[in-house]
């Protein structure tokens, strides 16, 4: 009986020791591995994707890209949003879904932009900024009979992409592009009709300057202006930018004073 009782006491002690060892081992594992526990999720927003993935992996999580968007002025591969959010708790192995910044901007076909020619610059510049992140600036003004501040030309880089002739074909802009505008004005809209008749053609071109356009309708290559349309009428004005049509000849018309070099 004594031996039998002693035997069972020893067996009980052995079993108890094993159970205690297992319990201690599991307790230690729970402390160091958080096994079965929920772990707080770290803030990943504004971090580079590679760094964020490494941090999450060390915590026992996996980062998965669910979306990407282009942000003007921000380099690609930066985390903008995460789900679950920081501070929430999740079990090991949970996926964290993130939204990243794109490396390349979205391209916007010009013909998908709202109508610009002849529209209010003040209004359309706000639409372009809010809807497409496109920045606008006025770089010049041209006389126009209509309402001041209307868009007459749209320039991207050094190219005019929108004017009275329409929209330049197959042009796309990166989101965040900068556009330059020529808008209408009524200031300085008229000039006196000059008298070009009897003058040398080169002199007429000089007098027209940037205010008027000259167009030869007859006598191309002639030396003198023999007629013009509209005709010269003292104290009569025409719109700045209008065209005066001239006829040229290599001989002066009757009544014109002779040039000193002739």
Image (cartoon, grey):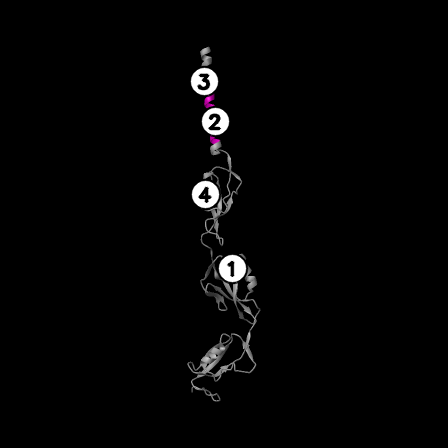
Mark 3 and mark 4 residues within 8 Å of each other at the beta carbon: no
SS under mark 1: strand
27, 83: nearer the viewer: 27
Q: Residue furthest bottom?
A: 254
Q: Secondary structure at mark 4?
A: helix
Upstream in sequence: badge 1 or badge 3: 3
Q: Name above or below for residue 57 compared with residue 162.
A: above
Distance between the Cα atoms at labels 3 and 4? 50 Å
The residue positioned 49% from the left and 60% from the top of the image is: 178
| Horizontal and vertical percent position of residue 231 | 52, 82
Tell me the mark number nearer the camera, choosing from 3 and 4: 4
Residue 49 horizontal/vertical position (percent): 46, 46
2 and 3 marks in contact (CB < 8 Å): no
Residue 11: mark in rendering: 3
165 to 132, vertically: above or below: below
What is the chief secondary structure element of the magenta stretch? helix
- Mark 3 falls on what kind of element? helix
CB atoms of marks 2 and 1 within 8 Å: no
Q: Earlier in the sequence, mark 2 or mark 3?
A: 3
Which range of residues does the magenta coloring cover? 11-30
Residue behind mark 4? 53
Q: From the image, tell me which residue sits under label 1.
A: 135
Calculate the distance from the C-alpha at mark 2 to the C-alpha at mark 1: 65 Å
Above or below residue 73? Residue 17 is above
Q: Which residue is label 2 attached to?
A: 24
Q: How many neighbours does mark 1 have within 10 angstroms: few (below 14), some (14-19), or many (20 or more)?
A: some
Q: Residue at x 46, y 60 (%)?
A: 172
Label 2, secondary structure: give it: helix
């Amino acid at each position: 009986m004594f031996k039998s009782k002693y035997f069972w006491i020893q067996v009980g002690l052995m079993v108890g020791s094993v159970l205690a060892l297992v319990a201690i081992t599991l307790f230690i594992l729970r402390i160091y591995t958080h096994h079965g526990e929920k772990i707080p999720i770290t803030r990943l927003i504004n971090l580079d994707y590679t760094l964020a993935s490494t941090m999450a992996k060390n915590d026992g999580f996996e980062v998965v890209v669910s979306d990407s968007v282009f942000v003007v002025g921000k380099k690609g591969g930066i985390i903008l949003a995460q789900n679950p959010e920081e501070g929430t708790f999740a079990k090991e192995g949970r996926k964290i879904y993130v939204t990243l910044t794109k490396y390349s901007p979205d391209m916007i076909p010009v013909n998908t932009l709202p109508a610009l020619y002849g529209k209010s610059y003040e209004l359309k510049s706000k639409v372009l900024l809010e809807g497409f992140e496109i920045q606008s600036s006025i770089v010049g003004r041209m006389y126009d009979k209509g309402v001041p501040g209307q868009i007459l030309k749209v320039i991207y880089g050094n190219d005019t992409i929108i004017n009275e002739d329409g929209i330049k074909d197959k042009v796309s802009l990166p989101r965040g592009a900068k556009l330059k505008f020529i808008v209408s004005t009524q200031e300085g809209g008229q000039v006196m009709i000059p008298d070009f008749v009897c003058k040398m053609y080169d002199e007429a071109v000089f007098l027209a300057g940037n205010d008027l356009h000259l167009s030869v309708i007859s006598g191309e290559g002639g030396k003198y202006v023999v007629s013009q349309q509209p005709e010269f009428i003292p104290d009569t004005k025409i719109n700045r930018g209008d065209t005066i049509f001239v006829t040229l000849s290599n001989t002066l018309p009757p009544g014109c004073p002779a040039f000193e070099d002739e």
